[in-house]
Image (spheres, rainbow, N blue to C red):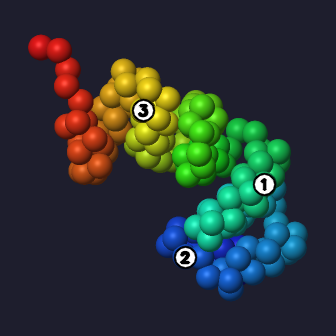
Amino acid sequence: SAAQACYEAARDQRAVPGDLASCDQALNDGLSSSDRVATHVNRGIIRALRGDYPNALLDYDRAIAINPGQPEAFLNKGLLFLRLPKREREAVEAIDLAIARKTSEPALAFFARAIAHEGLGNLGAAYRDYRQAATLAPNWHLPARELRRFRTPS
């Protein structure tokens, strides 16, 4: 189905025009509310990959308008804010909501929030979030690499 093709493109981090067209078609196919939310998130991911940040943000906001409890829309919105200059505070706010709503990717959420905190100069919060990401995903090398940059008092 078009919704499945849209999901697979977002999952595989593809951003070709046909994938975006699949998302558009799916949204015109009379999806259930939950599938409509997921398709907006997936289309937002594809748009972000294409560098179309304003429309990606619109998709995440549409998903949130349909279901304000959907954590992945908030997580992806936070990730998008990290790509934009001087939007770290908004990234933290969105990621906080994703974590509170039990995102399916908590390690990524904590890692992304650590980056945002670091950008805001809040190194203590950044360190704690990198540690949480490392705890949640011990085989993921990025949190451990970032933690090596910090010096803690002995």
Mark 2 or 3, nearer chain start: 2
| Amino acid bearing label 1 | Leu
User: In the image, is residue 57 above or below residue 78?
Assistant: below
The x, y position of residue 25, in whole percent, is 81, 78
Displayed quadrant of residue 134: top left
**Disc number at residue 14?**
2
Label 3 element class: helix
**Disc number at residue 58?**
1
Question: Outermost residue, bottom direction?
Answer: 18
Task: Write the residue at 25% across / 51% down.
Answer: 141
Q: Is residue 119 left or right of residue 76?
A: left
Q: Using a 10 Å C-alpha cutoff, classify the residue at mark 3 as few (fewer than 14 neighbours), some (14 to 19) or many (20 or more).
A: some
Placement of the C terminus among the 4 image quadrants:
top left
Label 1 element class: helix
Q: How far, Cα to Cα, is label 1 from label 2?
A: 19 Å
Task: Write the residue at 42% across / 32% down.
Answer: 118
Kindly check if marks 3 and 1 are in contact, taking CB atoms under 8 A apart as contact: no
Foreground of the two, 56 or 99: 56
Residue to which mark 3 is pinned: 118
Kindly check if marks 2 and 3 are in contact, taking CB atoms under 8 A apart as contact: no
Task: Write the residue at 62% across / 71% down.
Answer: 50
The x, y position of residue 27, in whole percent, is 82, 69
From this viewpoint, is residue 69 visible? yes
From this viewpoint, is residue 132 visible? no
